[in-house]
Amino acid sequence: MFQLGKTIISEDILEKEFVCNLSACKGACCVDGDAGAPLSEAETKIMEDIYDKVKPFLRKEGIAAIEAQGTWVKGTDGDLETPLIDNKDCAYVIFDGKTALCGIEQAYNQGIVDWKKPVSCHLYPIRVKDFTEFAAVNYDKWDICDDACSLGKELEVPVYKFVKEALIRRFGADWYLELEKVAEELKKS
């Protein structure tokens, strides 16, 4: 672990390799698990604001779940998250054949909304936990991502490079430049 500003970072994000392999996993992270995607309070407002524009991209099951539960929910631990369909799929999941994709991201890709998706989804496999004085930045190892780990190793792409855009979105460009410096120093040692 090391500190960068007000973040405590696991060295795993510099040392582990990862590149999503949708052809292998079929977007399992959007349909497996026991909770929705983590959201910040600010993101819940965005979800409410964009729902009408995103709704045409969603499946009827997702729309039904959102209209019954809301555009976001409080999970069993009190954290804010996306609603689920029957405690499984994220309500915002759509499918391209058998591959799970994000309906919000599809609306973004088509220029309908200017928000890509929840930052927690964009950051995956990094998970950020906010505390009063700092944020913990950790690599989340999940067996459904074994193919992503293999592809990352083959392509030699560390986690932090794979999620560069998301890290900049969450922490800023200056923070990311400092992270790159730490990564370079670690390589030398």
Image: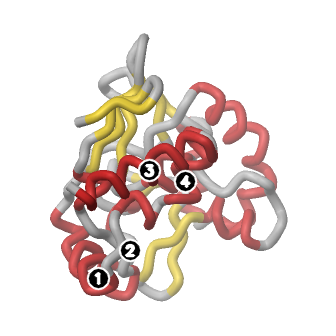
Q: Residue furthest left?
A: 143
- Marks 2/3: CA–CA distance: 24 Å
- Marks 4/1: CA–CA distance: 19 Å
What amino acid is found at the position of numbered circle 1 in the picture? Leu
Q: Position of residue 162 (x, y in %)?
A: 44, 66
What amino acid is found at the position of numbered circle 3 in the picture? Lys
Residue occupying image coordinates x 37% and y 57%: 184
Task: Sort mark 3 into few (<14), some (14-19) or many (20+) by Cα contacts within 10 Å.
Answer: few
State the residue position of label 4.
166
**Which label was assigned to residue 181?**
3
Q: Quadrant of residue 68?
A: top right
The answer to whether residue 67 is visible is: no
Q: Nearer the viewer, mark 4 or mark 3?
A: 3
The quadrant in which the N terminus is found is top left
What amino acid is found at the position of numbered circle 2 in the picture? Cys
Confirm or deny contact between disc 2 and disc 1 (CB under 8 A): yes
Task: Sort mark 2 into few (<14), some (14-19) or many (20+) by Cα contacts within 10 Å.
Answer: many
Q: Nearer the viewer, mark 1 or mark 3?
A: 3
State the residue position of label 2.
20
Q: Position of residue 123 (x, y in %)?
A: 46, 53
State the residue position of label 1.
151
What amino acid is found at the position of numbered circle 4 in the picture? Ala
- Marks 2/4: CA–CA distance: 14 Å
Regarding mark 1 in the picture, which secondary structure is present there? helix
